[in-house]
Amino acid sequence: MFENLQKELDDLEARGLRRICRQVEAVEGARIRMDGRWLLHFSSNGYLGLARHPAVVAAAEEAAARYGTGSGSARLIGGNLPPHEELERELARFKQAEDCLLFSTGYMASLGIITALTGPEDLVVGDRLNHASLIDACRLSGAALRVYPHSDADRLEEVLKERRGRYRRAMVVTEGVFSMDGDLPPLPRIAEITRRHDAWLLVDDAHGTGVFGEQGRGSLEHFGMETKEILQMGTLSKALGSQGGYLAGPRAAVELLRNRARSFIYTTAPAPACSAAALAALQVVRREPDLRRRLWENVRRWTSGLEGLGWDLISKTSPIVPVRVGGNRETMALAKALEEAGLYAPAIRPPTVPEGSARIRTSLTSLHTAGDLEEALGAFKKCLQTS
Ligand SMILES: Cc1ncc(COP(=O)(O)O)c(C=O)c1O
């Protein structure tokens, strides 16, 4: 009965596209142990190392002891626990928005936001490199979906000019920092075009939050933008070291989501320990700007080191530093060689990225020391000599 599934798996294997989840035996600082070996860890989105920060861990432990390990029911049924309400208030303040709603993951935030705010009479226009959760949400919403070339604001404007008038609502969707490319879109221009064409702007700042801007508020702060009318979505699972998703934005939008977002309504509230951890992480982001300074110093050292060795970087503007390879098999071979040389960084292949653009995605954290980076550059140097 399941034979054709095996064929599908064999086909993935043959094309160099089979994926597996590796077993992680331990993590310590910027090192990860797999198959009995400690490797330099260049695959974490925990940009500030907060998942292990003592204040964040203590907040999670205390919330679990006080409120239990699970929330027990959906919030519209069982109510809010204090960590949910406090985190929503704090996130709204941090993102300079009127209100905020938590979801159990960033993926669920995408689904809930886009499907509740748009439907078959509406238009959604998205960047070609948007994250899978945004694409899935657009499809599920039933809205007409148009895609513009990556970061191409002129093309976005043409689409809106041509099509906006035919629809009830229009929403433009982009990431604040692109998860597999590490670059930022021209957000001020996109916001201006969006406003002029009477459309909403949804910015998924999963990778910008905690990292960009003087206060770590994210990509909008980085560009010095007014936040009031922007729908700011994000995840708690990256720089904030926890788990959960959110939308921060105008009160009416957030209140409508409380009533209409199915991935909020029909699921159990986030575990109180996760919300308490994220709340503590936000306080650390405010209290310890040094973490961010260290992270950016690492980004500078790493990108100039890799370029000095002759590697082709897809971008060097964020802690996500993808090294261009191209073919799937070559990329897998490079990932393997790097691992043999002591460095763990994932090979990213289609369908996560377009065909022919496979890459090694390295990501920096504030936990990497200057010595770690030197050692990691040594691994890349070794692979260059053998590739
Ligand atoms: C851009 C982007 N949006 C959304 C998500 C989903 O967030 P979560 O992991 O909290 O589901 C991710 C990563 O997982 C992401 O990279």
Image: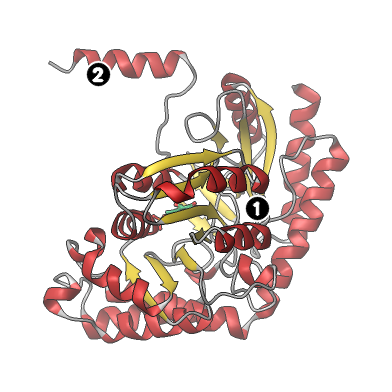
Circle 1 is placed at which residue position? Answer: 185
Mark 2 residue type? Leu
The relative height of residue 157 versus residue 268 in the rendered view (above or below) is: above
Q: Are marks 2 and 1 in contact (CB under 8 Å)?
A: no
Instruction: Decide if residue 215 is in sight here.
Output: yes
Left or right of 324, for residue 175: left
The residue lying at 59 percent from left, 46 percent from top is 156
Disc 2/disc 1 C-alpha distance (Å) = 39 Å
Quadrant containing the N terminus is top left
Residue 245 appears in which quarter of the rendering?
A: bottom left
Which quadrant contains ligand 1? Answer: bottom left
Residue 105 appears in which quarter of the rendering?
A: bottom left
Mark 1 residue type? Pro
The residue lying at 45 percent from left, 50 percent from top is 165
Who is closer to the viewer here, 204 or 216?
A: 204
Left or right of 144, for residue 369: right
Residue 73 x, y percent position in the rendering: 14, 70
Q: Secondary structure at mark 1?
A: loop
Left or right of 172, for residue 123: left
Residue 320 x, y percent position in the rendering: 64, 51
Who is closer to the viewer here, 368 or 174?
A: 174
Instruction: Decide if residue 23 is in sight here.
Output: no
Q: Earlier in the sequence, mark 2 or mark 1?
A: 2
Who is closer to the viewer here, 100 or 252?
A: 252
Residue 266's tag is: none
Badge 1 crowding class, 10 Å Cα cut-off, few under 14, some 14 to 19, many 20 or more, is some
Residue 5's tag is: 2
Q: Secondary structure at mark 2?
A: helix
